[in-house]
């Protein structure tokens, strides 16, 4: 069994005080199917409680009234030690979120830096990036641009392994890839083009390979705290494999947030990923794509 992830025990979350579907920027959003505010609040609170019960801590940033998707805190920025690479969102509807997020990160010890601004022209969304193995694994295509990989590698002095996302329903990496421990991750090959699907499987020593149907239950959009996996849905085959590996599965109802195209992982931004411990440092950076 792989060693538990050392990160994933402190998170930033944004309460759904202004969560609604005002536009459609992913296949799940329909302005005619609005989330219920009461149920959304209860479901969000259940995630917070489950994180605390699993041994994690939760920090809270209030939602901007003009940013209905801000509840999906994973996409606010990529936190690495005392830095945070702020997201440069593909869609203009989400760009106001950073006006509140950057000051919060700065006040909590994470210096904001940027990729895709000041003329660089590359979009980056933090839901496309995970520290795993020897690299920062970054999905690109629908939201994050390939150009961002080079800037991440050189700016952060890390190895970046890029995976091209090709499935409209898994538009962020966190819908198709979930680190479980130091050697295991949930991976859905159907999310990627052929070369990237092979690369994704090759970078995980012991993958839990998800079918397209399994991944579309949002089961990869989960959070792992030690040996506890908080999941929005868990197909029976996936549960059996996780439990055989010694994980405790906690299933949470996040149906209201699925209307906006996100689930447990999208609602939570890990604040405790440490370069040198969780992500090897590589002088000058390195980008590897299939």
Image: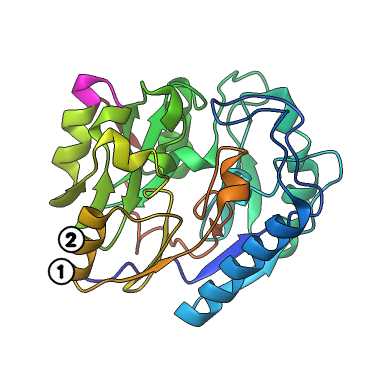
- Please say whether residue 242 is one of the residues in the magenta stretch: no
In the rendering, which numbered label is found on residue 207?
A: none
For the residues labelled 1 and 2, say whether their Cβ atoms are less than 8 Å apart: yes
Q: Position of residue 252 (x, y in %)?
A: 49, 63
Along the horizontal axis of the image, is 109 left or right of 131?
Answer: right
Q: Can you say whether 155 is above or below 12 in the image? A: above
In the foreground, 105 or 238: 238
Q: Nearer the viewer, residue 134 or 125?
A: 125
Q: Which image quadrant for residue 182?
A: bottom left
Label 1 vs label 2: CA separation?
5 Å
Above or below 7: residue 37: above
Question: Is 66 positioned to the left or the right of 85 in the image?
Answer: right
Placement of 71 over or under 167, stated as above or below: below
Query: Can you give x and y, in whole percent of width and height, for residue 173 in the image?
Result: 41, 37
Residue beneath the point at 66% across and 48% down: 112
Q: Is residue 199 left or right of residue 212?
A: left
Q: Is residue 184 above or below residue 142?
A: below
Q: Point out which mark residue 241 bears.
A: 2
Q: Quadrant of the N terminus?
A: bottom left
Q: Residue at x 27, y 63 (%)?
A: 181
Residue sitting at x 38%, y 23%: 167
Image color mode: rainbow
Q: Give the x, y percent position of residue 129.
A: 43, 42
- Residue 244 — which label? 1
The crowd level at tag 2 (other Cα within 10 Å; few <14, some 14-19, many 20+) is few
User: Residue 185's spot in the image, x, y percent?
Assistant: 25, 52
Residue 290 showing in the rendered view: no
The magenta segment is: 192-196
Q: Secondary structure at mark 1?
A: helix
Magenta stretch: dominant secondary structure:
helix
């Amino acid at each position: 069994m792989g060693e538990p992830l050392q990160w994933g025990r402190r998170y930033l979350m944004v309460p759904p005080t202004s969560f609604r579907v005002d536009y459609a920027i992913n296949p799940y959003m329909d302005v005619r199917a609005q989330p219920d505010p009461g149920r959304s609040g209860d479901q969000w609170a259940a995630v917070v409680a489950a994180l605390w019960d699993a041994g994690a801590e939760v920090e809270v940033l209030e939602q901007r009234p003009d940013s209905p998707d801000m509840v999906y805190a994973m996409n606010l920025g990529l936190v690495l030690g005392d830095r945070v690479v702020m997201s440069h969102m593909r869609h203009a509807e989400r760009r106001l979120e950073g006006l509140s997020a950057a000051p919060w990160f700065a006040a909590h010890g994470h210096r904001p830096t940027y990729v895709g601004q000041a003329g660089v022209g590359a979009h980056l969304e933090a839901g496309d990036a995970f520290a795993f193995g020897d690299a920062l694994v970054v999905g690109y295509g629908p939201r994050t641009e390939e150009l961002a990989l080079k800037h991440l590698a050189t700016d952060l002095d890390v190895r970046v392994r890029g995976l091209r996302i090709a499935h409209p329903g898994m538009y962020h990496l966190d819908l198709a890839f979930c680190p479980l421990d130091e050697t295991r991750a949930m991976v859905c090959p159907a999310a990627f083009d052929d070369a990237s699907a092979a690369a994704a499987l090759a970078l995980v020593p012991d993958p839990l390979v998800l079918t397209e149907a399994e991944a579309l239950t949002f089961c990869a959009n989960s959070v792992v705290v030690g040996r506890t996996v908080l999941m929005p849905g868990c197909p029976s085959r996936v549960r059996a494999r996780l439990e055989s590996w010694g994980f405790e599965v906690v299933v949470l109802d996040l149906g209201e947030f699925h209307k906006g195209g996100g689930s447990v992982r999208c609602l939570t931004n890990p604040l405790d990923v440490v370069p040198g411990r969780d992500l090897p440092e590589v002088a000058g950076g390195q980008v590897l794509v299939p």
